[in-house]
Image: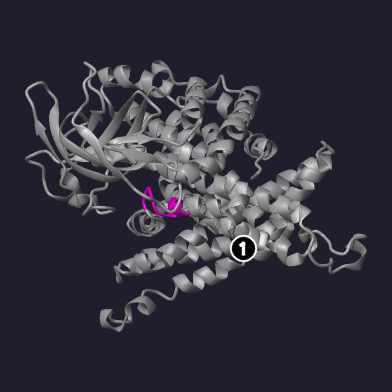
């Protein structure tokens, strides 16, 4: 059976040794009561629940899948009990509005919790994590009456939430959607249309479901400027069923315990959220939350795949160690002695731990943008959130999927066999690169909207923080040349995109994927240099945990020596421009 141990020590290292999260929280009024003891208690309790209640259902939920019968969805055996335990523990509202029953924990802490639950059972965790995002949207844009009515139930888990964007003919291009909302006399609307790919659109876990639906008013302008947002409950106040039904569920490559539904709205009663024709702006509150959350799905997948690959490499004996002194007494040695197996494992470890630090950094910026007393600090943090959200979603999920494939390689033939679990991780991780905006769309968002159209302003602010880190002598001297070179390459490529886009509108799209990769690689290199410096400081202090700290240093050095050099290749590809992609005609494909 697959194994998993919540990475409690590494989470504590990132939060408290690296970022000093307890001091940061105490400086903001909204988070002043969150201290290290409380945060570690939450992480410990979340880890235990993920290990004991979510992990045992992952393989069985995949094998059983969801069942659909005449509009009714039954989730896999055990899901209801685990969901109830999770909900009754207050986990849905961990980061929710305290005024309506949430616990108000900082995002920097909640992303750590998300990683653990996504690692152990992404199919099951998708239900409450969508609810948390829907609750955030209502808390941000709903009326006071709407908040009072729905948020307590959503935080309690008795009502779940969905986001309904995609239609059969309109995926990423939401301006094409056709779902209509006709005004009624009693201040609500009759909503009609079909939505597809709706995660948790129908299930048996909660008593009610709140659907957040994008639709058009009768007089709405065409395109994305004519989209409004509506709240559509499964059950109305009198207990009657609203006119929304599941037409079917998808049969998928992975996350089979998550019900992905076709929803049909046939004059369903709907209540508008926000202003008419401004629904897409409201929906982005939830979309950006879910994009970071889906990034955490990738990080969690990479972590559980690594843990299982490492356990296998310690136990499986094959071949002899290349260094005679390391050979055991048996006929063969553990896989872990082989340099290429170490390459596979260290790559996973380096990306997982770098991603864990990056997720905490992005979470910190979300907290500062929301709670910082200084307006300039809050505005700067909001810019970093806008710039880094597409990077977090895409880079986490790309590296998470890669990590699952590398783990599969460590196990060899056993990695391809279902009973060992790795092949499920590969299948489950793949969707994270696609939904909540494909990673290609994230890259386009970063290169076009957040860089070219912005004139490189957000990118420059991000670079300034890294330059200050180097200037303040916090970067270990042996890692400094590589980090400085990567930072210069990033600065050069940013200028290339900003300047080139003025003459070549195809340039940002041509460079987008590589530019996002370069941004992620640079981010991890910076954070690894920071972590190495902190770990070496702990070693110099003699503060204990020598093996952990030395492992942190060695992993950071591996990242800089073997992974960071890819920055030069990415820069060359970016600076090749759009011509290599556009030179071939459509007929020549």
* Quadrant of res 495: bottom left
- Residue 8 in the figure: left or right of residue 211: right
In magenta segment, residue 432: yes
Determine the secondary structure under disc 1: loop
Q: Name the residue under label 1.
A: 564
Using the image as rendered, state which of residue 560 and residue 196 is in the foreground.
Answer: 196
Q: Where is residue 487 in the image (x, y as percent from the top left)?
A: 56, 60
Using the image as rendered, state which of residue 370 and residue 339 is in the foreground.
Answer: 339
In magenta segment, residue 365: no
Q: Residue at x 40, y 16 (%)?
A: 99
Q: Residue at x 25, y 22 (%)?
A: 143
Q: Is residue 55 above or below residue 31?
A: below
What colouring does the structure picture have?
one colour
Q: Is residue 384 above or below residue 208?
A: below
Q: Residue at x 43, y 54 (%)?
A: 253
Q: Give, as a single range, the part of the protein colored magenta.
A: 430-437
């Amino acid at each position: 059976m697959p194994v998993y141990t919540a990475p409690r020590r590494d989470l504590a290292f990132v939060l408290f040794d690296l970022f000093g999260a307890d001091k940061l929280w105490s400086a903001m009024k909204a988070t002043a009561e969150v201290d290290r003891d409380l945060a570690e208690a939450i992480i410990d309790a979340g880890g235990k629940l993920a290990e004991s209640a979510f992990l045992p259902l992952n393989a069985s939920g995949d094998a059983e899948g969801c069942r659909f019968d005449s509009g009714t969805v039954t989730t896999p055996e055990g899901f209801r009990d685990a969901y109830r335990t999770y909900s009754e523990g207050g986990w849905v509202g961990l980061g929710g509005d305290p005024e309506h029953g949430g616990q108000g924990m900082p995002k920097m802490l909640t992303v750590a919790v998300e990683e653990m639950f996504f690692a152990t059972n992404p199919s099951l965790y998708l239900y409450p994590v969508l609810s948390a995002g829907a609750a955030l949207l209502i808390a941000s844009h709903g009326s006071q009456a709407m908040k009072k009515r729905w948020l307590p139930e959503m935080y309690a888990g008795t009502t779940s939430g969905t986001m309904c964007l995609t239609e059969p003919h309109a995926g990423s291009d939401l301006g094409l959607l056709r779902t209509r909302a006709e005004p009624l006399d009693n201040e609500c609307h009759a909503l009609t249309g079909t939505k597809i790919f709706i995660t948790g659109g129908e299930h048996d876990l909660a008593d009610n479901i709140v659907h957040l639906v994008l639709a058009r008013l009768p007089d709405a302008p065409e395109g994305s400027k004519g989209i409004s947002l509506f709240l559509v409950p499964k059950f109305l106040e009198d207990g009657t069923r609203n006119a929304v039904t599941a037409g079917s569920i998808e049969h998928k490559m992975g996350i089979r315990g998550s019900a992905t539904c076709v929803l049909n709205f046939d004059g369903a009663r709907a209540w508008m959220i926000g202003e008419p024709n401004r629904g897409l702006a409201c929906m982005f509150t939830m979309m950006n939350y879910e994009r970071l959350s889906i990034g955490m799905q990738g990080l969690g997948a990479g972590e559980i795949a690594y843990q299982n690959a490492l356990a296998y490499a310690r136990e499986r004996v094959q071949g002899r160690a290349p260094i005679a002194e390391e050979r055991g007494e048996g006929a063969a040695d553990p896989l872990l002695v082989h340099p290429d197996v170490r390459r596979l494992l260290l790559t996973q470890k380096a990306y997982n731990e770098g991603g864990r630090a990056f997720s905490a950094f992005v979470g910190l910026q979300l907290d500062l943008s929301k709670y910082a007393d200084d307006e300039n600090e809050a505005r700067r943090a909001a810019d970093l959130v806008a710039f880094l959200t597409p990077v977090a979603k895409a880079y986490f999920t790309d590296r998470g999927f890669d990590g699952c494939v590398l783990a599969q390689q460590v196990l060899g033939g056993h990695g391809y066999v279902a009973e060992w679990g790795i092949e499920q991780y590969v299948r489950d991780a793949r969707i994270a690169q696609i939904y909540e905006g494909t990673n290609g769309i994230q890259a386009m968002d970063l290169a076009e909207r957040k860089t070219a159209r912005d004139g490189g302003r957000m990118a420059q602010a991000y670079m300034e923080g890294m330059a200050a880190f180097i200037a303040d002598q916090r970067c270990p001297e042996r890692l400094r040349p590589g980090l400085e070179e990567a930072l210069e390459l990033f600065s050069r490529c940013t200028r290339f995109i900003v300047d080139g886009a003025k003459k070549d509108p195809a340039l940002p799209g041509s460079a987008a994927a590589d530019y996002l990769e370069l941004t992620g690689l640079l981010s991890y290199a910076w954070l690894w240099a920071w972590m190495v410096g902190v770990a070496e400081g702990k070693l110099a202090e003699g503060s204990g945990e020598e093996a952990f700290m030395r492992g942190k240093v060695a992993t950071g050095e591996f990242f800089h020596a073997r992974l960071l050099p890819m920055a030069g290749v990415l820069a060359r590809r970016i600076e090749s421009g759009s011509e290599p992609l556009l030179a071939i005609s459509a007929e020549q494909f």
